[in-house]
Image (cartoon, helix red, strand yellow):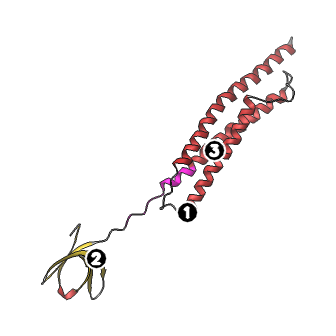
Amino acid sequence: MESSVADNTDTSSLAELRTSARGWHGVQLAVLGFIGLCGVLQRGNEDVPRSLQILSGGLVLGALVVACVATVLVAVSAWPVYARAPHPDDQTEVRRTVGRLRIGIALTFVAVALTALATTSQWWPAEPEATAAIVEVSTAGGEICGELRQIDTSGVTLVADGNLVAIEFGEVIALRSVTSC
């Protein structure tokens, strides 16, 4: 009688493990879809250094490989393929199934972490666009508005109406920054 109870417990444990593995297999397929989506959504961002783009791509590919290995481990636990059917009281098969399932679940979390790490490169700060300073210079002859090119010890150089204009400091009455001419 005790042998019969032990056989039912082992068979029941193996059946519960396989049911759990089937549930995790669905989660893993969702993770594979997430990795694929993150890989597709990665855009080339000129502001991100090339080495970081390569690292990010490598992490996404690594996550895909890890997720595939995890999926195989869990799938073998859920739907085993045997050369011979295991004996119902085979504790070795229960231990193997538990081991494959644990490793598969752990690798699933590793794949998600790698994907999250890979996508952080998209938050690389963009360099602000340089804008030219526009100034208005008042002189005795009038006002000149344009894009500031240079200020040195002798004067101010502007681009006004497509022409390069140099004004000596002795001629400048006022100089102010403006938003447009």
Residue 73 is left or right of residue 112, and the answer is right
Count of numbered badges drawn on the protein: 3
| Residue at image point 68% right, 28% down | 22
Q: Residues within 10 Å of mark 1 (few under 14, many from 20)?
A: few
Q: What residue type is labelled 2?
A: Leu
Residue 20 is left or right of residue 173, and the answer is right
Q: Which of marks 2 and 3 is nearer the N terminus?
A: 3
Q: Nearer the viewer, mark 2 or mark 3?
A: 2
Residue at label 3?
111
Residue at label 1?
50
| Residue at image point 80% right, 28% down | 94
Q: Which mark is residue 148?
A: 2
Q: What residue type is labelled 1?
A: Arg
Vertical placement of 86 versus 173: above or below? above
- Residue 28 location in percent, x, y? 63, 36
Label 2's element? Answer: strand
Label 1's element? Answer: helix
Q: Which of marks 1 and 3 is in front?
A: 1
**Quadrant location of residue 69?**
top right
Could you give the CA–CA distance between mark 2 and mark 3, rounded to whole angstroms?
A: 52 Å
